[in-house]
Image (spheres, rainbow, N blue to C red):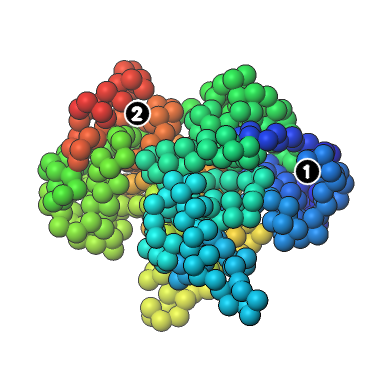
Amino acid sequence: MHGISKSFPGVRALADVSITLERGEVLGIVGENGAGKSTLMKVLAGAYRADEGRVLLDGAEFAPRGPRDALDAGIVVIHQELSLVPDQTVAENIYLGNLPRNPLGMVRRAVLHRNSRALLARVGLDIAPGMPVRRLGIAQQQLVEIARALSREARVIVMDEPTATLTIAEQRILFATVADLRRAGIGIVFISHHLEEIFEICDRVTVMRDGVTVATRPVAEWDEAGLIQAMVNRPISALFPPRTSSIGAPMLEVEGLSSTGRFSDVSLTVRAGEVVGLGGLMGAGRTEVLKAIYGAMPDTTGTLRIDGRPVRTRNPREAIAAGIAFVPEDRKGEGLVLPFAVRDNVALSTLDRLAWLRMFSAAGRTDRLATDAVGELRIRTPGIGTKVGSLSGGNQQKVVLARALTTHPRVFLLDEPTRGIDVGAKVEVYRLIGELAAQGGAVLVVSSDMLELLGLCDRILVMRGGRLAGGIEREAFSQERIMALAALG
């Protein structure tokens, strides 16, 4: 792609962007939301037509009139939001829009299943072609998407945030498949906010910022600090705003919290003005502890005190009334109603307070609440009436945080608050967390990002196998200490 430029009304999305992808190469593309990554890939995939520039495919001019032209040329985009049809079979999804048919137009089922089995084997997926897609896990669905790409004899596969919803084990399966595709000579564009993934599987990395390409270099010539500085135009030390809060008396006290089969005998304290991290490996019970405190985990025992007073949180409504806010890991599944407007999502937790006689929404107060939240949290949206599902991941996360803040909580339970958002949006979330602590809030944050825990927290507690394995004070912070507690107890 040479000299690609693209403008929309009032916005110059791309300005003279150039990238090159070789056969059998994995090219990482990184940048903040709004850097132009998706727009560039939509030009490649035929969804947008560039205002200037040209695309060459195997040395020949390539000017797709639409997505069908790109598919026919072997260019396939696998989006973060999977595009499978849940009620159709695996085989039907693999050959969606391209089913093998006989001269009478009837689907040749035997051929469909035979070809599908061969493609599934290529991506290391041992499932029946006739299985409905809705019965598959996210990682299996991701591999079905790749099998569909191979069914079209893909030469170029674009993977946009492919690991956003995968566990560590599922990521390993995906990375092994990417390695096989590379050996088969397929060029792969890998877009991710997770820099550790970029360093693991990419051959070269292109950094985009504000619609231009900043630099392209072999992955061995980058380090994490250099990549981040290139993306946000500031050093890594500026990621975490300086903390100004003073730590006070215990605000959240948990004693002997247990839930059969999930975690047991968890006791912890978070003081006013303090940010405490909860680290550990996948499956250690971190999310379950936060949900139990919030009243969203059944069969929980133990005691809970807020500001020294015993409280009961048998459900989220009681937790909210006690001054507890929870930001879930799965913002789209548990934190937002995607078809609703920004206004409605911000107000979800305070409808009782905003409604008149609990029957009619007080539209004016709802609008003011949402407008204030958009300004205070710097949510980038065309308006409070915009559907929240159309916002970027970082701005969706800010809407979830805004909804939590409307209840005026004193205790904040944050589960992976920066998962799947870009570096710039992370800085905004870190700033907000610092402000919550500075105002006397108690923050308990679960994160799988070592750098995040080390840069954000005053103390780090580590879980292993459903129990607290130990704690680390800030002056003793190190990745090695965290991993030792997480893996060895």
Residue 186 versus residue 344 in the image, above or below: above
Is 68 left or right of 30, judged from the image as shown?
right
Is 463 left or right of 354, judged from the image as shown?
left
Q: Residue at x 58, y 31 (%)?
A: 202
Does residue 365 appear anywhere in the picture?
no
Q: Residue at x 48, y 38 (%)?
A: 175
The amino acid sitting under disc 2 is Asp
**Disc number at residue 419?**
none
* Mark 1 vs 2, N-terminal side: 1
Q: Residue at x 59, y 20 (%)?
A: 220
10 Å crowding of disc 1: few (<14), some (14-19), many (20+)? some
Q: Residue at x 33, y 46 (%)?
A: 413
**Farthest right residue in view:** 52
**x and y percentages locating residue 351 in the rendered image:** 41, 70
**Disc number at residue 57?**
1
Is 263 left or right of 282, judged from the image as shown?
left
Question: Which mark is in front, 1 or 2?
Answer: 1
Q: Secondary structure at mark 2?
A: loop
**Disc number at residue 458?**
2
Q: Quadrant of the N terminus?
A: top right
Q: Mark 1 touching mark 2, by CB under 8 A? A: no
Q: Toward the viewer: 209 or 375? A: 209
Mark-to-mark CA distance, 1 and 2:
52 Å
**x and y percentages locating residue 263 in the rendered image:** 18, 45
**x and y percentages locating residue 299 in the rendered image:** 15, 57
Q: Toward the viewer: 157 or 355? A: 157
Is 285 left or right of 152, judged from the image as shown?
left
Q: Secondary structure at mark 1?
A: strand
Does residue 52 appear anywhere in the picture?
yes
The amino acid sitting under disc 1 is Leu
**x and y percentages locating residue 481 in the rendered image:** 30, 21
